[in-house]
Amino acid sequence: MLGYLVLDDGTVYKGSIFGAEKSISGEIVFQTGMVGYPESLTDPSYHAQILVLTYPLIGNYGVGPEERDEHGILKWFESECIWAAGLVVGELSEQYSHWSSSRSLSDWLKSSGIPGIQGIDTRDLTKRIRSKKNGCLGKIVIEGTPLQDIKFIDPNIRNLVAEEVKTYNPKGSSKILFFVDCGMKNNQLRCLVQRGAAVHVVP
């Protein structure tokens, strides 16, 4: 399916939709890492943002299973779900290979209701994002939907907090910590409980 990435300055990129076939909008941000897309997509700091990955080929090692460590924390992800609103890549690898992979990136996005778009000049897009002093809003629009029907949304006006209290390592003996969740990553939590702390994550 064809789709479009539209910026708030009127720039339009044409590409192919993968993952969920739906239109979304949000702030566009980029990430330059060569690996780590499962961690990035589940990073709460990307909540409601459209994530651009600048590395030219994405998806070649698939996505790992939802395995948990001895404290009940997911091993391969930074949180319990994908927080990014959408994904933008130059080229999506349809084939994946890794000893821990259980599914493709496209299948994972589809099952999570997250759209992606490939075939985008991410180099040019990143230069445009960096040139904007106040951030860049954008939207992914699937073919057949009028571009003007999808409104630009700024996720920065929304709060990102936990909705309920959760306790990890309740028998921890070194310290008792209260962690106010403003976008906590699993690895931050893991580092605390591995040091023997009992951690209460609160809204």
Image: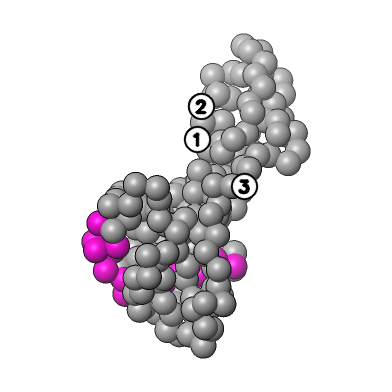
25 is higher (above) or lower (below) than 187:
below
Front-lying residue, 80 or 63? 80
Front-lying residue, 143 or 156? 156
The amino acid type of the residue labelled 3 equals Arg
Lower sequence index among marks 1 and 3: 3
* Residue segment shown in magenta: 113-127
Task: Count the labels in the image.
Answer: 3
196 is higher (above) or lower (below) than 14:
above
Q: Residue at x 63, y 26 (%)?
A: 179
* Residue topped by disc 3: 158
Front-lying residue, 77 or 163? 163
Front-lying residue, 40 or 10? 10
Q: Is residue 117 magenta?
A: yes
Q: Are marks 2 and 1 in contact (CB under 8 Å)?
A: yes
Coloring applied to the structure = one colour
Lower sequence index among marks 3 and 2: 3
The amino acid type of the residue labelled 1 equals Asn
Q: Which mark is residue 187?
A: 1
